[in-house]
Amino acid sequence: MVRKAFGYALMIGAVSAVAVGCSGGDPAQAQTSQAVRNEVREALGDVPIRVDTLTASSLSGAFRSAAATALPAVVQVDVQSRMTVSSRRLPFMIPGIPQDQAPVQRGTGSGFIIDEQGHVMTNNHVIEGAERIIVRLADGREFDASVVGADPNTDVAVIRINARQGESFPVSQFGDSDALRVGDWVLALGNPLGLDFTVTAGIVSAKNRNINILRNDSNTQLEAFIQTDAAINRGNSGGPMVDLLGRVVGINTAIESGTGYFAGAGFAIPINLARKVANDLIEYGVVHRPRLGIQITEVNAADAEVYKLPRVSGAVISTPPEPGTPAAEAGLEMGDVIVSINGEEVRTVSELQAKVARMRPGDVVEVGVIRYGNRLTRRVKLGEFEQVTARQARASDEPSAEMRLGFRAMPAPPEAAALAGERGERYVAIGEVDPYGPLGGVFRVGRGDVGPIILKLNGQDVRTVADVQRIARSVKSGDVVSMVYLNPNGQPTILNYRVR
């Protein structure tokens, strides 16, 4: 019915434009126009209908205004990474030393600037495995960027532009994805198919879609996509979906297609969920994910009959909550059908997961359930998922003082030290780079790899790991570090960066 009403709304615009342009008017035509408007009102309920907002010219003006508002903060995200090779290799080619050299892979996605500090929101799959990230703005400026954090469970990532002091950035405006209704106009912005800063238009086709594209072993993935028929193609990933006021309401993420090209259905992460994830990544480096402690399934027609539900809606607790979990402590039981969270209706599993995911561990929520026809409310104090992220895994190892600089130091092996031109001398090399640290977008050196040789840190010569650790202990968060290292051609190269 909503789709039919939407189609009629466009027809009203066309009919009204003709009627306004005619002197006298046709009574039959006017009667038809009024009948159509009445049908639209009946379909949309209390939504106000104004003929002047339905004309083609006013709709075009809304599109132009929304695009002009949103485009300046849209960015192109160019990613360079290396294909995995089986043998141990040096990331920097050393002349005269044979080794496997992994070919460079390049990819392009999209993103949008979310604050004046240059944080950019995009998809995890856009920047995953990135060795170098380059951000290009609509005004032509380009910068290297580093990864702040990423969450594979929602496919949200945050990168930060490595800007010079004094640089300013346009910032996206945010809308409310919860307020979106099926049939609302939206625009998809990004860089599809190599066509930079492209705008396409469509409507919200559905909400809270689960398309099983985010899968992991721990079963903690969360999908509650906004579906749209606005064209989304390769390269759009990470770009914003905006409403007609130019406010971001989603992150373009996926398409349903057998060819890899748009086939009528695109999917975006709701911005209300994405902002919570992004804020956690910026503040903590990880996502603090709240936990009810239940297994749930969609309600079907048989469930509605057995559990005496007024309609086929809600999420069924399908197994007994484990003792000690928040749900068990609050008295929730197997067979309870969750129909609301804090008074807001819950219709599907995805909707329930999305509402809970925007909360924080320790929050107390009111869970409305139907227990075999009886409505109950239970207050639940949310727990937290125990998960080991890449950053937490590194933290569990024996820490090294120099990791605050964004890397772990190691004695340079003889073949790498030979690059310095002084055989027999001791040198120190980068042995592992924190991919989420300030050097994550500059070097890609994993555990067991050998990175570039370091000659100086903050003007001081370094020849041993102890030298690096001594200097690292004097560096505080926010300080600028000046490093001189040997590039792949054996030339001293200076790199200045700010530690976090």
Image (cartoon, rainbow, N blue to C red):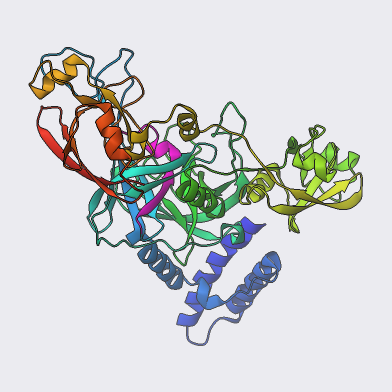
* Residue at (68% x, 68% y) in the render: 39
Q: Name the quadrant of the N terminus.
A: bottom right
Q: Nearer the viewer, residue 331 or 15?
A: 331
Residue 231 screen position, x and y as percent? 43, 48
* Residue at (21% x, 28% y) in the render: 452
Number of dots carrying numbers: 0
Residue 111 screen position, x and y as percent? 38, 49
Instruction: Report whether 111 appears left or right of 453.
Output: right
Region rendered in magenta: 117-132
Within the image, what quadrant is residue 403 found in? top left
For residue 130: magenta?
A: yes
* Residue at (15% x, 40% y) in the render: 494
- Would residue 300 be visible to someone looking at this image? no
Within the image, what quadrant is residue 426 found in? top left
In the image, is residue 147 above or below residue 270? above
For residue 106: magenta?
A: no
Residue 212 screen position, x and y as percent? 58, 34
Residue 401 screen position, x and y as percent? 36, 34
Instruction: Report whether 61 appears left or right of 370.
Output: left
* Residue at (85% x, 38% y) in the render: 335
Instruction: Report whether 321 appears left or right of 53.
Output: right
Q: Nearer the viewer, residue 345 or 279?
A: 279
Q: Nearer the viewer, residue 213 or 128?
A: 128
